[in-house]
Amino acid sequence: MGQLTIPDHATVYVDTAPVIYSIELHPAYWTILQPLWMKQQAQEIRLMSSELLWMETLVFPLKA
């Protein structure tokens, strides 16, 4: 699998799948996505998403 190249000060749109893979620490994707979250935490990039992401991400935990 590849790696993400994210320029500093970029605005990155995040869809549902990367969020779910990160929450679940999916072995195939976690190492690829980790730099994204680290850059966001260091305020090197800005993340955006839609409100739909919250609904799609929370549907399974709310059912459980």
Image (cartoon, rainbow, N blue to C red):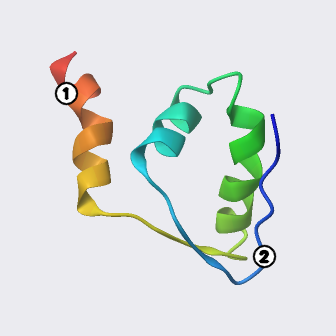
Residue at image x 66%, y 55%?
Answer: 37
**Callout 1: helix, strand or loop?**
helix
In the picture, measured across the screen, residue 12 lies left or right of residue 16, that is: right
Q: Is residue 5 above or below residue 8?
A: above
Q: Is residue 26 above or below residue 43?
A: above
How many residues crowd around disc 1 within 10 Å: few (fewer than 14), some, or many (20 or more)? few
Dividing the picture into quadrants, the one containing residue 7 is bottom right
Q: Residue furthest top?
A: 64
Q: Is residue 8 above or below residue 56?
A: below
Q: Residue furthest left?
A: 63
Q: Of the residues under marks 1 and 2, which one precedes in the sequence?
A: 2
In the picture, measured across the screen, residue 3 lies left or right of residue 24, that is: right
3D distance between C-alphas at marks 1 and 2: 35 Å
Q: Is residue 6 above or below residue 3?
A: below
Percent across and percent down for residue 12 are 57, 70
Percent across and percent down for residue 1 are 81, 33
Q: Which mark is residue 31?
A: none
**Callout 2: helix, strand or loop?**
loop
Looking at numbered disc 2 in the image, what kind of residue is underneath it? Pro
Question: Residue at label 1?
Answer: 62
Percent across and percent down for residue 29 are 68, 33
Question: Residue at label 2?
Answer: 7
Looking at numbered disc 1 in the image, what kind of residue is underneath it? Leu
Disc 1 + disc 2, Cβ < 8 Å: no
Quarter of the image for the C terminus: give it.
top left
How many residues crowd around disc 2 within 10 Å: few (fewer than 14), some, or many (20 or more)? few
Percent across and percent down for residue 5 are 81, 62
Residue at image x 73%, y 65%?
Answer: 39
